[in-house]
Amino acid sequence: QVQLVESGGGLVQAGGSLRLSCAASGSIFSMGWYRQAPGKQRELVAVIFSGGSTNYADSVKGRFTISRDNAKNTVYLQMNSLKPEDTAVYYCHARSSPYGKQYWGQGTQVTVSS
C-alpha cells in the first residue's frame, strides 16, 4: 500500500507563487496533481512519468511546473502567476504501474485572492 503525504498550499494573492510537494512511501510509475474547485469536477493539473515526460492542463501551461525527485519519491508542483481561478483543493495522485492501482493524497487547499 502506497501512502502519499502532501505539503504546501495556502493563501496567496493573484500573481503570486506556491509550491506543493507530495512524498510517496513506495515505488511509483507516475505522479501528478489534480484539483477540484467547489461545484466542479476533479481535473488533471499535471503529471510526470517515471521517464520524466510530463503533461499539463492547458489552463496551467507556462505557469505551473511539475518535477520529480526519484531518489526521494517526491513530486513537486511549482505554481507561478497564480490566478483566482486556480483556487481549489489540490490532490496528489500516483499510479504504481501504467494501468495499476491509483493512490490519492488527502488534499491541500490553495486559495488565490484577487
Image (cartoon, rainbow, N blue to C red):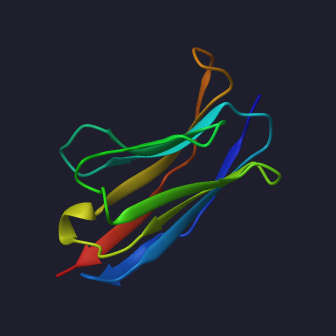
Q: Quadrant of the N terminus?
A: top right
Number of on-image labels: 0
User: Does 23 appear above or below 94?
Assistant: below
Q: Residue at the location (16% across, 82% down)?
A: 114
User: Does 105 appear above or below 100?
Assistant: below
- On screen, residue 75 versus residue 10, left or right, reads right
Which picture quadrant has residue 104?
top right
Q: Residue at the location (29% across, 73% down)?
A: 82
User: Does 36 appear above or below 77?
Assistant: above
Which picture quadrant has residue 72?
bottom right
Q: Position of residue 99 (x, y in %)?
A: 57, 14
Which picture quadrant has residue 93?
top right
- On screen, residue 38 versus residue 101, left or right, reads left
Q: Position of residue 81 (x, y in %)?
A: 29, 76
Q: Position of residue 16 (x, y in %)?
A: 34, 83
Nearest to the observer: residue 72 or residue 22 = 72
Q: Residue furthest top?
A: 99
Q: Residue at the location (61% across, 43% down)?
A: 52
Nearest to the observer: residue 45 or residue 13 = 45
- On screen, residue 59 versus residue 26, left or right, reads left
Q: Residue at the location (52% across, 44% down)?
A: 32
- On screen, residue 35 versus residue 107, left or right, reads left
